[in-house]
Image (spheres, rainbow, N blue to C red):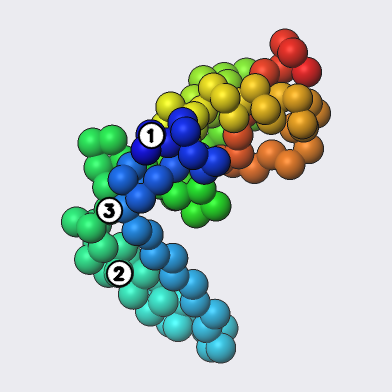
C-alpha cells in the first residue's frame, strides 16, 4: 500500500529501522567527557554502514540532523523541503497543507518539523 494511502508519513518499506543512543556520565571531568565523545564517535562510525543512503532518510520523531535542519531564516522553506522530502516522502505537500491550517503560527516548530506555508498562514 502506498504511503499516501496510509495515515502515516512513512512506512517500513521507505524507512529502515533506526536506533538512538544517549549517555549521562556521572563523572564531570574533561577526561570522562573526552572518553564519552570518543565512544560516541566510534559508535557512529560503526553504525554508518547500516543507515539508509542515496537518499538518506529518517523516521518521524527521530531527529537525524545529518539529513538537514531548518534555521528559520530567509531560506526556511527551502531548508525544510530538503529534510522534509526525506522524512515524509510524497506526503510532504499534504502534511504542509495540514500543518498550515492547524498551526499557522508554527508554534510547534523544531529544527525538523513539518513546514508551514507562510503566505497562507
* Nearer mark to the viewer, of 2 and 3: 3
Q: Secondary structure at mark 3?
A: loop
Quadrant position of residue 11: top left
Residue furthest toward the bottom? 26
> Could you tell me how far apart the alpha carbons at marks 3 and 1 are, in whole angstroms?
22 Å
Name above or below for residue 14 compared with residue 117. Answer: below
Is 41 left or right of 60, judged from the image as shown? left
> Which disc is residue 51 wearing?
3
Name above or below for residue 94 compared with residue 45. Answer: above
Name above or below for residue 5 compared with residue 57. Answer: above
Please indicate, yes or no, whether residue 110 appears anywhere in the rendered image: yes
Is 12 left or right of 72, judged from the image as shown? left
Image location of residue 77, percent across then percent down: 58, 21
Which quarter shows the C terminus? top right
Residue on which disc 1 sits: 2
> Could you tell me how far apart the alpha carbons at marks 2 and 3 are, in whole angstroms?
12 Å
Front one among 98 and 81: 98
Amino acid at each position: 500500500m502506498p504511503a499516501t494511502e496510509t495515515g502515516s508519513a512513512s512506512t517500513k518499506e521507505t524507512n529502515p529501522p533506526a536506533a538512538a543512543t544517549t549517555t549521562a556520565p556521572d563523572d564531570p571531568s574533561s577526561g570522562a567527557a573526552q572518553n564519552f565523545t570518543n565512544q560516541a564517535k566510534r559508535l557512529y562510525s560503526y553504525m554508518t554502514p547500516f543507515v539508509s543512503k542515496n537518499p538518506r532518510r529518517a523516521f518521524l520523531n527521530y531527529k537525524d540532523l545529518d539529513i538537514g535542519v531548518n534555521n528559520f531564516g530567509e531560506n526556511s522553506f527551502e531548508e525544510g523541503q530538503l529534510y522534509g522530502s526525506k522524512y515524509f516522502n510524497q506526503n510532504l505537500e499534504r502534511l504542509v497543507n495540514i500543518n498550515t491550517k492547524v498551526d499557522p503560527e508554527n508554534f510547534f516548530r523544531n529544527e525538523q518539523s513539518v513546514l508551514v506555508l507562510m503566505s497562507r498562514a
